[in-house]
Amino acid sequence: MSETMQPVETPKARRGGPKMQTTTNEIAVDIVGMHKWYGDFHVLRDINLQVKRSERIIICGPSGSGKSTMIRCINRLEEHQQGRIVVDGVELADDLKKIDEVRREVGMVFQHFNLFPHLTVLDNLTLAPIWVRKMPKREAEEVAMHYLKRVKIPEQANKYPGQLSGGQQQRVAIARALCMSPKIMLFDEPTSALDPEMVKEVLDTMVELAQEGMTMLVVSHEMGFARQVADRVIFMDAGQIIEANEPKEFFAHPQHERTKLFLSQILH
Amino acid sequence: MTATDVQPVYVRRLLMDAQPAPITMTGPIGWLRANLFATPLNTALTLLSILLIAWVVPPFAKFLVIDATWVGVDRDACLPSATRPEVGACWPFVRERFAYFIYGSYPVAHRWRVDVFFALLAVGVVWLLWLKAPRRDLGAFYAFVVLPIVSFILLRGWPLLGLPTIETAYWGGALVTIVVAAVGIAVSLPIGILLALGRRSRMPAVKLLSVIYIEFVRGVPLITVLFMASVMLPLFVPDAWSPDKVLRALVGIAMFASAYMAEVVRAGLQAIPKGQYEGAMAVGLSYPQMMRLVILPQALKITIPNIVNTYIGLFKDTTLVSIVGMFDLLRTIEAARIDPKWATSVTSATGYVVAAIFYFTFCYMMARYARYTEARLAKSDRR
């Protein structure tokens, strides 16, 4: 209840100030006893996960284990049927306003980029700031160029997504999410659709982001990346969290039989 | 074992420059080979087409030009005689009745108003369709707000402005055809979009209403809709309220076209990958923003050929308004061709040729425009 007494912060104030640690709430994402079904199929079973601010979490597991579905529940691209999901102090329920509020604060990067092909790179980046944040066009473009420089492709600003390589497109997608100044970033297999040559440039961008203290949930099988940046690695199977540990321990001494089997399959 | 020249290790030392293509692939010979005689089937089709052209074109040319009558004041000029056993098209008939084909019975003294309307409409069409035109936002405002109001005042009249009222019963010819088609085209797309969105809505009531509307209207012939609009509507409302005859036909046509347009747009919406919706939602766009800024621009782009296809169908369907007593272009030609002053064995054919030229010109222009936008899109997809 004490939370409601705190002054309400406006998006504007947040944009001006430092991005992190502006609220006293130290929990970025809190998932408690969450279940989800696709029709009769129980895809997510009793998910409990607390993500602290600035924490980096890598989620791995066999395909169909529910990894993507879980992180898609966090910005309500998927609906859960039981349990609670609280994102940045806002509980996700059917309230559309709450959903919009959460989506403004949570950036997402997809396996297949999902850039808007009919808009230039710059327009892809400024669309949401202009329409959702009501930012003036000039300011939005400045912000967009800032992030394009950070992902090292400012020269592509006026091209269309179809003219870029996969790695460049994924970096644009990351910049697009960052333009909304999100507090949390979700990555859904960001390198799985890329040619091997382009994986590194995307991972480098993500490493930089992690070093700056972004709260990140990453579904990925890039184990090198997990070792390098993750605070915790989570292994999922059959819709459940099987094992969670800090990366060193996770890779060196997996506890569960299923985890051991999985790691033996992907680490050769 | 025999010694071979094949070596397991190969490294290219000299990179080869691009060479010109062989002569059989470029120039007129290359064009002929690629387009007319590429395969035996192609060659056969080419020859068949040449035969077809040779079979069809000369009789047409003979009727329309060589044997045609060019001057005259009544049917006598177009009658076969001992010196002229073969009579072609009767052009004096068309020349005399041309104004009737364009304006119908619109009073002669006020026909300038129709001319101004045509000019205003042409400006609107060009402004909207010419993609590099300046201020296309203003063009849309002009075409969808200013033009309808001004046209209504101009054509129907506003005595206060010195424009006497001219009842729609006097409207006719190409004027009616173009008014009905233009209103149908302008109204069916926005309503069609709303119906398509409604049909895909997650709100059950909206979805149900949209489905009922679309399926009901699509399941009934246009003639039935027009009959209902013109015959049954007056039965239910008092005479004084009974809407104008042209208006009733307009509503009927627009309703009908909207249902078809809704299905065309729905197909486009379904072709947009789910990732586009998710990408738009993930950056925080609301549903209306997502639709307007991300989904519809892409969906309508890929639907342009089908939208234009529906428009072409609509344009030709306007001829059906003659059934409810309106004098569209075809109906004026029908009326003129049985006029005893011009009745000959070739008058009907001549009139129908005029109708064919008119409808073909408009439909072909629409088709060409669709091709042009398609080509443009194909280019932008390759980018």
Image (cartoon, rainbow, N blue to C red):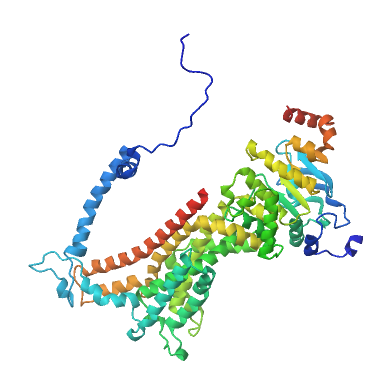
* Nearer-the-camera pick, A51 or B316: A51
Vertical arrangement, residue A59 with respect to residue B88, above or below: above
Q: Single out the residue that lies furthest toward the right.
A: A2
The quarter of the rendered structure image containing the C terminus of chain A is top right
The quarter of the rendered structure image containing the N terminus of chain A is bottom right
Q: Is residue B376 left or right of residue A93?
A: left
Q: Quadrant of residue A104?
A: bottom right
Vertical arrangement, residue A54 with respect to residue B38, above or below: below
Q: Single out the residue that lies furthest toward the left.
A: B82
Name the residue: 43% across, 69% down.
B181
* Nearer-the-camera pick, B341 or B315: B315
User: Is any part of residue B319 visible from this angle?
Assistant: yes
Name the residue: 75% across, 38% down.
A225
Q: Position of residue A58 (x, y in %)?
A: 78, 41
Q: Is residue A179 left or right of residue B176?
A: right
* Nearer-the-camera pick, B260 or A127: A127
Q: Quadrant of residue B81?
A: bottom left
Q: Quadrant of residue A182?
A: bottom right
* Nearer-the-camera pick, B217 or A42: A42
Q: How many marks?
A: 0
Name the residue: 66% across, 64% down.
A137
Q: Position of residue A258 (x, y in %)?
A: 79, 31
Q: Position of residue B217 (x, y in %)?
A: 50, 64
Q: Single out the residue that lies furthest toward the top.
A: B1
Q: Position of residue A160 (x, y in %)?
A: 57, 52
Q: Is residue A154 left or right of residue B160?
A: right
Vertical arrangement, residue B238 with respect to residue B53, above or below: below
Q: Is residue B217 left or right of residue B24?
A: right
User: Is any part of residue A80 visible from this angle?
Assistant: no
